[in-house]
Amino acid sequence: MDPFVKDKLEEWGLMEWSNAFEENFIDEESFLLLDSESLKELIKRLGPRMKAAKKIKELKQIEAACVSQLFLLY
């Protein structure tokens, strides 16, 4: 399993779903591309799926802010 994905699933309390991520070859790049439809395939239960969607959205926002700051430095 991709170490980034494993770390995030552990951090977010979603390790129960780690097999689905591994079976579908979800790595860091594809993890950051997940949308609600993709998450439906990976996480069958609504509660954990909603938590994952929220956390992924937050992670994307943090990454976007970091990229923006990098551009400001140059």
Image: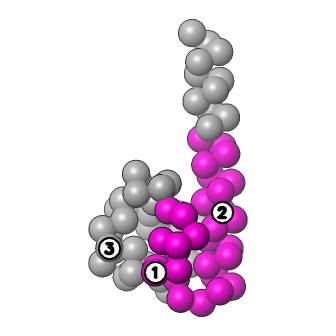
Q: Are marks 1 and 2 in contact (CB under 8 Å)?
A: no
Q: Give the residue type at disc 3.
A: Asn
* Residue drawn at the location 39% of the way across and 74% of the way down: 21
Residue 46: image x %, image y %? 65, 86
Residue 17: image x %, image y %? 47, 82
Question: Which is the main secondary structure of the residues drawn in magenta?
Answer: helix
Q: Label 3 vs label 2: CA separation?
A: 20 Å
Mark closest to the chain's N terminus, 3 or 2: 3
Q: On the image, numbered disc 2 is attached to which residue?
A: 55
* Residue drawn at the location 52% of the way across and 73% of the way down: 37
Q: On the image, numbered disc 1 is attached to which residue?
A: 41
Which quadrant of the rendered structure holds the C terminus? top right
Mark closest to the chain's N terminus, 1 or 2: 1
Q: Quadrant of residue 50?
A: bottom right
Q: Label 1 vs label 2: CA separation?
A: 17 Å
Mark closest to the chain's N terminus, 1 or 3: 3
Which stretch appears magenta?
A: 34-63
Q: On the image, numbered disc 3 is attached to which residue?
A: 24
* Residue drawn at the location 65% of the way across and 15% of the way down: 72
